[in-house]
Image (spheres, helix red, strand yellow):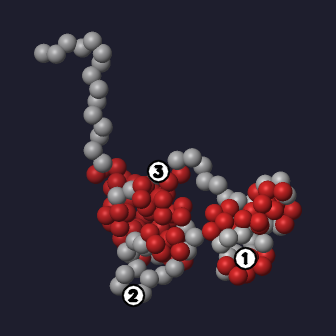
Amino acid sequence: LRAFQREAGQSPALLPSEKALKAAGRGDLWQAVRVLGGVAAATAALGFYPPHRRPRGHWQKFETVVMELHLYLRQFPRPPGIYRVLPTLHELRQRGREDLQYAVKQHDRQKLVEALQSLAATMDSSPSGSMDGLPALKQRRGASTPAPPVASPRGAKKQ
């Protein structure tokens, strides 16, 4: 597994996924993980970090996606002039962020761009560079989202 990680340029701290191993034609390594007792047992036995699983519905929250994208853009800065443009789905996949790729697909991309621009402007004007802009982002998003229609009670007579 360690040799595979070096060859594939993967993090030595994380157990390669089944998908990555099989795509590289190394189903034998995945079989070895299964023989060790599965991902949890192999992770513990070989000293890898445990796999990180997000709770169900994590990517449904718009603000969560905006914050993750913002952190991604800080980790992988853009050339001047295009910092606040969303990364492409291909770029996210290349950098191993299929989770973020999925999240971007779940939301309106134009709204994500607008929220990132707003958050970046708020952080740029904040003396500490903190993420204090998130509450304002929630308020703006909530204000622009139309209220759901109210259902009439059953049996109500039409006038």
Q: Based on the displayed image, in which of its 4 quarters is residue 95 positioned?
A: bottom right
Give the spatial CA distance, label 3 vs label 2: 31 Å
Residue 61: give its label. none
- Mark 2 — residue? 80
- Looking at the rendered structure, the kind of residue marked 1 is Gln
**Residue name at image x 75 percent, y 62 percent:** 30
Q: How many marks?
A: 3
Q: Secondary structure at mark 3?
A: helix
Marks 3,2: beta carbons within 8 A: no
Residue 5: give its label. 1
User: Residue 148: horizontal and vertical position, in percent?
Assistant: 30, 37
Residue 60: give its label. 3
Most distant residue in the left direction: 159
- Looking at the rendered structure, the kind of residue marked 2 is Pro
Most distant residue in the bottom direction: 80
Q: Secondary structure at mark 1?
A: helix
Q: Is residue 20 above or below residue 154?
A: below
User: Residue 61: horizontal and vertical position, in percent?
Assistant: 46, 52
Image position of 132 (left or right of 39): left
Q: Secondary structure at mark 2?
A: loop
